[in-house]
Image (spheres, rainbow, N blue to C red):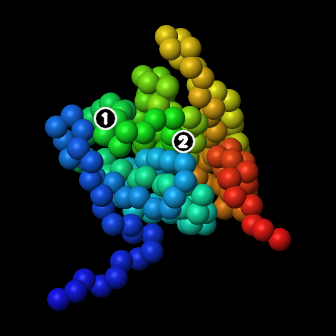
Amino acid sequence: MQNPPSAPSAAPLAEVRAHDRVMRYRREGAGRPLVVLRATPGPDGVWPELDAQLATCFRVITPEIPAGCTDVARWLTGFLEGLGIDRVALLATDACCLAAIELVLLDAAQIDRLLLVPAGLVGDTGLDGTLATSLAGVSVPLLVVRRGLSAAEALPLVRRFLGLDAVRRPAG
């Protein structure tokens, strides 16, 4: 008996082994790598239009963080090493935002730019700047876009920050 076809946003699971662990993830699209950290697997309601746009310009990698993982930043470091990639853009939502900041502070050389999408007041959105480590002397561009912002307001900020408009422009 065949399984019913999965939804387009549900890419098949892939696996990578790092530090004697099997780490699972979903991969969609092609291009520069973009790692999306979500507390729960699958789309989580953060602007579905964004998910569709990201996969047209990036190789979107969404790891499945193991249940009970107490050090997501270190787990993610091993995951990126297992994939053999560095200097990735990192998008983190809600509960994963702190782990993403920790990763930048622990190993800023792995992250090219950091986009945080926490819950909170829309008035605090569009904050941008850099995270810099005092030990490594590396700065990582940072943008905070609150989840409560409408897709029409959020998408232009995210596109500009990730360089989507510069990656691929429609012909004509």
Please tell me whether mark 2 sits on a helix, a strand or a loop. strand
Give the x, y percent position of residue 94.
47, 46
Going by the numbered disc 1, the residue's amino acid type is Gly
Q: Quadrant of residue 74?
A: top left
Label disc, if present, on residue 89 of the rendered structure = 2
**8 or 57: which is nearer to us?**
57
Q: CA distance from mark 1 to mark 2?
A: 16 Å
Can I make out residue 93 in this image? no
Q: Residue at x 46, y 47 (%)?
A: 35
Going by the numbered disc 2, the residue's amino acid type is Ala
Label disc, if present, on residue 78 of the rendered structure = 1
Q: Residue at x 39, y 69 (%)?
A: 10
Q: Residues within 10 Å of mark 1 (few under 14, many from 20)?
A: some
Give the x, y percent position of residue 1.
17, 89
Q: Residue at x 45, y 69 (%)?
A: 9
Q: Viewed as shown, does residue 137 lie left or right of 11?
A: right
Check the image and name the residue furthest to the top: 135
- Which quarter of the image is occupied by the C terminus? bottom right
Q: Viewed as shown, does residue 18 lie left or right of 161?
A: left
Give the x, y percent position of residue 33.
50, 48
58 lies above or below 123: below
Please tell me whether mark 1 sits on a helix, a strand or a loop. helix
Give the x, y percent position of residue 65.
31, 47
75 lies above or below 66: above
